[in-house]
Image: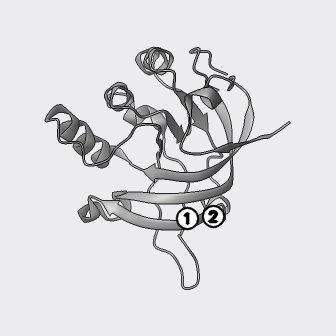
Amino acid sequence: MIRSIQLPLKDDVIKTLRAGDEVLLNGPVYTARDQAHFRLVGAYAKKKMPLDLRGQVIYYAGPTPARPGKTVGSCGPTTSSRMDFFTPHLLKAGLKGMIGKGSRSEDVRRAIKRHKAVYFITIAGAGAYLSKKIIDAKPVLYKDLGAEAVYKLKLRDFPAIVGIDPMGKEI
């Protein structure tokens, strides 16, 4: 049975998620790729975090420009392991979930377990399909990074699988 999950994530929901669960995500997420992660972790180190990440989910994606009449262009996941160096820092800052593709490092898996967070995997190579599950998109931070700026997206029935659960178990 596919579960509908409301975002931002709440602790009582996170603790019920198990590796392999199929979910439909609904609500706001932030996008962030490599350069945005670099800047966010730098800001966190200086205690000048520009976003309140508590309970939030980051989608490892950089949407392409929207065609006329569309909310967003193609918006597929990028390889999550590229963010592994930064992820424990952002989990410490309050981040509760990530969406991407591929496996994560042992350090990330331990950090997910320590901070009772979750890692979702979504469909690779299906950015056009996934963009239909995004009902709003606005750049909110680091706009100079173009497609890699931090966007706030609103998801509706966005398909994902729990890749690493809050107990640290992975599929």
Q: Which amino acid does the dot numbered 1 rest on?
A: Ser
Which residue occupies the foreground of this view, 43 or 106? 43
Separation of disc 2 and disc 1 at Cα?
5 Å
- Horizontally, residue 118 falls left or right of residue 143, namely right
The residue drawn where x is 17% and y is 35% is 47
Q: Which amino acid does the dot numbered 2 rest on?
A: Ala
Which one is earlier in the sequence, the residue at label 2 or at label 1? 1
Q: Quadrant of the N terminus?
A: top right
The relative height of residue 33 versus residue 153 in the rendered view (above or below) is above
Q: Are marks 2 and 1 in contact (CB under 8 Å)?
A: yes
The residue drawn where x is 43% and y is 52% is 31
**Residue that badge 1 annotates:** 74
Q: Quadrant of the C terminus?
A: top right
**Residue that badge 2 annotates:** 128
Which residue occupies the foreground of this view, 11 or 139? 11
Residue 129: percent from left, percent from top: 68, 61
Classed neighbour count for the residue bearing mark 1: other residues with Cα under 10 Å, few (<14), some (14–19), many (≥20): many
- Say what secondary structure mark 1 lies in: loop
- Looking at the image, the residue that sits furthest to the right is 1
